[in-house]
Amino acid sequence: MNAIVKSPHQDIQSPVAGSQVIASSERKIWPLTGGVHPEENKHQSTSRPVSVPPLPETLVLPLSQHAGLPADPLIRVGNKVLKGQMIAKASGFVSAALHAPTSGTVTAIENRPIPHASGFYDLCIILETDGQELWCQLAPVADYRQLSPAELVEKVRDAGISGMGGAGFPTAIKLAPGTAINTLIINGTECEPYITADDMLMREKADAVIQGAEILQYMLGARECLIGIEDNKPEAITAMRRAAAGKNIDIVVFPTIYPSGGEKQLIQILTGQEVPSGKLPADLGMVVQNVGTAVAVKDAIVDGKPLISRITTLTGDALAAPQNVDVLIGTLAQDLLQYAALKTSELSTLVFGGPMMGFTVDRMDIPVIKTSNCLIAATEDEFPAAPDAQACIRCGHCAEACPSSLLPQQLYWHARAENHEQLMHHNLFDCIECGACSFVCPSSIPLVQYYRASKGAIRTQEAKHTKSERSKQRYEDRLARLEQEKAEKEAKRKANAERAAKLKAAKTAEQTGSDAKAEEDPIQAAIARAKARKAAAAAGNSEPASGRQASDRPLSAKQKELKVQLSMAKAQAKKTERALAAAEASAELKGDRKDIEQLKSNLAMLNEQVSQLQQAFDENSQDSASKDSPEKPVKVAKPALSDNEKKRKVELAMAKAALKKAERALAAAVESGFPDEQENTESFKQAVEACQANIKRLEAEASEPPAETAIPPSADAKPSAKAKAPLTDEAKKLKIESAMANAAVKKLQRAIASTGEDEQDTLKQQLVAAEQKAAELKQALESLS
Amino acid sequence: MALINSRSSISQRGRETSPHALGQNSTQRVMSLVIMATIPGLMAQTLFFGWGTLINVVWCSLIAMGCEAAVVSLRQRSVSFYLSDCSALLTGVLLGLALPPFAPWWLSLVAVSFGMVIGKHLYGGLGQNPFNPAMLGYVVVLISFPQEMTTWLPPLGLEGHNNSLTDALFTIFPLGQSVDAISMATPLDVLRENKSLTINELWEANPVFDGMAGRGWMWVNLAYLASGVFLIWRKVFTWHGPVGMLAAIAIMATLFWSGNGSDSHGSPLFHLLSGATMLGAFFIITDPVSGATSNRGRLIFGAGVGVMVYVIRAWGGYPDGVAFATLLMNMAAPTIDYYTQPRTYGHHKANKGLPKKD
């Protein structure tokens, strides 16, 4: 019955036996919320000193060993590299460089299995070692205080250092926060069972840790530096105390409890403060770095050596010689396990990382990377398969153990129901996935897995939601645009109708004057009516006054020509008519109908010609009416710019500048062209669109008739606004496409520069095609705007 | 190469999700610990009220396991897997303890099968039931058969009735023979029916009930209290629920305690140590499935039960009200959960109520 229900809180106050001296830290510490006490299993790997395994024949160096973008290879297959030479550079802000861990030859750059929870393959540089260990030129800094913090950050960035505690966030970014830093916390907690890499590092390289901490403190300008260590590492504490003696560094020892080594948890224990949800420790004026990272920083600055090796724990009951090794990055697990005398028949599970947060792998040709702090070759007895999950009885042991004060039993409930709303309400995303809840669960429910899956589902759903929101916005914008166009058309039609009505009135008045004349000549009248009808049909307008309307305006050359032709045809028709009348009169006398027939057909032909000309003329003038007329009033009514308008113009210019900037950013993003960046690119595109929308709005505002100036007819003002606005949807699309095409061109140019001759031809062809496409797009864009 | 061999040996298990180390806790252990903790109370009840309680506990456990097995096999699940979690056994034991010592066999059958089949499995089995199955079964027979349910034997040695195991067996399972069991009301009953006597006179008239809460009853309650403290110490459940309930009963009893008069509802100590108070506080309302789930929620849940137990005892139609109070608070538990989320690390304040709609 002993310890049947493992207490999360038991022993929280009692220091481990033999650590009375070291536990007497004067500094106040705060208790961790929740937490568990798993079997520590650390002694197995601390009985031997840190050793250096023999140089392996092959090193596999994944380009993505850190959080962020994968590194960009700087070498080609077949290149010889020196130890410490940069072989891949950081490809963006959140990225880290990669260095050759030893001298040798690059034999391939290809997809290999990487240490990943999902068993992924990724691009790796394969390095065949030559056993010579020839170093490249190093640039050590004798006195780091001679350099500015910014210069030191650059050096850290060039050394390819990323967090060595497990998360692998590029260290240089954490060392250049935007806020002032008061406290530097060095994390020597190592709360996960089995792992002793930091413990051994502190025991054997305490001076390097302290030196690294001092450099970090200088770089950050931090007032105080705390090194947090759990009280289950008495030897490390003693060594660190000795190394830190007389320095402005506080070694803080606190009771062992999992997961005290989490960044947020450590801050809580050492300072009593909580990192606000969704914020960073830097917002509290704190930066947390792992002890391994501190040593890497010291190596990079003082010795000029980049990060090419790390201390990794090799442990588990399937190893006859569990120990810590100072291992070159890229060494395969199989080489290391063999070195630690793997009992192959007993191996049941191979874990990268610790037993609480690590992941299993199903093969052994996986390399150690910058974040690999532990390899556990476990037997079946050690990590037995989890028993079948039973029903959750809501016992609440998980809530007792949760270091984030969540209600894991409720989260589980809602995760199973896929109730995302409730999951968010229960702060799912504050879960640090430490596994304490799964550990204590009496029903053996894989709780953390439920939360991981739910987080993934929520992220996917949110991405979809954002996308659909954007589409909806676009659709609504389009509807608004169509509505506006419709309104403009309607206004124009009304204005036309009004004008036409006026003209008709004027015409009827004129016609009453010439009524007698019209009666005198019925044929003429009929022709006039026919002409009017045709003109009306041509103008798409029931009003019969288009011809007249057009003639009100000054005529273009074409119109003039048409008019001349028209009047000539009319004259001809009149002449023929007269001839016809005369012929008819004489035919009554002579009885000769032949001439009359001839004349009649002539007349019909002429009439048709007249009406055709008339139609052409009307159409022409109608066209020009819609084109010319807006110009006139604008030209006429171009008043001096009011203050308001000036302001708008300035705004417009600014918005255009912003657009250009956004476009450039977009181009850069597209250029980088990594799938991870897709999201980023998407956001840049959005930014571009937002800028364009802004410009359009400003332009619309600018072209709206200002209240204090003379109001030009609205029908005319609107089209002018439209003519000015260069950024229709199509233009936007074209711009984005053209930016992308330009990026593709640049990328290809670079590719050509870096590839061998045989490939260059195909690439060149591609380049030509891409350039052509870019030019076409540019042209299209220009013609549109 | 060694790789091939070792690969095949580790690919049997493939990739698994963290954590890979698991604690020693199990539902079965939690349940059996609780069952073991009922033993002192069971012994006290047997000592003071005869073999009936023990027979009841065994009989109810058999029915409970039988029901569980029947429904689980109807649902085409593994019977051994579900029986091994001991949750059915616990329900049976608790009902056996709660029912009167000489409750006839069919009464227990009705109570347990209703609780197990309708109260638990029709809702989806362990973890899904909104009501405490034991209390649901208890209330069904309490309402249906009030006569059988409100008569308890007097504590042993007072009326000089025969207390052999066979008699007890024949009382519960008559099999054609009838044994005249002498029955009488519980102290809570007597107190409730009392209209004229002062407390002292009442106790004098019923010497069986001397002591703080009646002989026997007090010791039974103290036994459950001791077991409860043990379970809290073993971290099976937290102190919040029991403390909430006991504190609420004590406060209510103090507020409405008019001393020794005939209209008195009894002293706080009388209420804490009589009836099913301690059994309820440590074994009934601590059922995590049907109770509130956060610590603050459990405190509120327990306090609600305590207040209602007192209200039912003092002014209600039944002498004891733990079962009714528990069921009523079971209904309130989901709402309590909504309003008692703890404050999450890094958050300014706790989320309350339902999620906000956009």
Image (spheres, coloured by chain):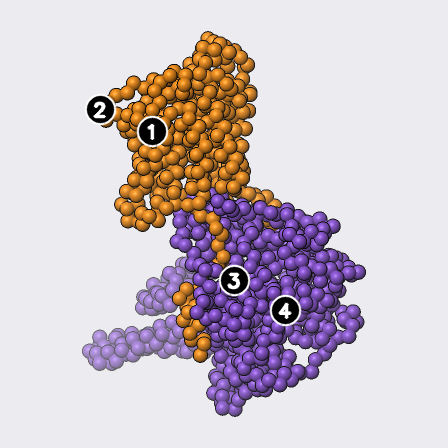
Chain colours: A purple, B orange
Q: Secondary structure at mark 3?
A: loop
Q: What type is the residue that disc 4 sits on?
A: Pro
> Can marks 2 and 4 be said to lie on one chain?
no
Q: Is residue A260 above or below residue A611?
A: above
Q: How many marks?
A: 4
Mark 4 surroundings: few (<14), some (14-19) or many (≥20) residues within 10 A: some
Q: Chain of mark 2?
A: B
Proximity of marks 3 and 2: CB atoms separated by less than 8 Å? no
Q: CA distance from mark 2 to mark 1?
A: 26 Å
Nearest to viewer (mark 3 / mark 2): 2
Q: Does residue A151 appear in this view?
A: yes
> Can marks 2 and 1 be said to lie on one chain?
yes
Q: Is residue B267 left or right of residue A279?
A: left
> Which numbered marker is on residue A49?
4
Determine which quarter of the picture holds residue A261.
Answer: bottom right
Look at 35% across and 45% down and name the residue there.
B83
Q: CA distance from mark 3 to mark 4?
A: 24 Å
Q: Which residue is mark 2?
A: B176
Q: Chain of mark 4?
A: A
Task: Report the front residue among A224 and B62.
Answer: B62
Q: What type is the residue that disc 3 sits on?
A: Gly
Task: Report the front residue among A670 and A267.
Answer: A267
Q: What type is the residue that disc 2 sits on?
A: Gly
- The location of residue A60, given as percent across then percent down, is 53, 77
> Which numbered marker is on residue B140?
1
Q: Does residue A719 appear in this view?
A: no
Q: Chain of mark 3?
A: A
Nearest to viewer (mark 3 / mark 4): 4
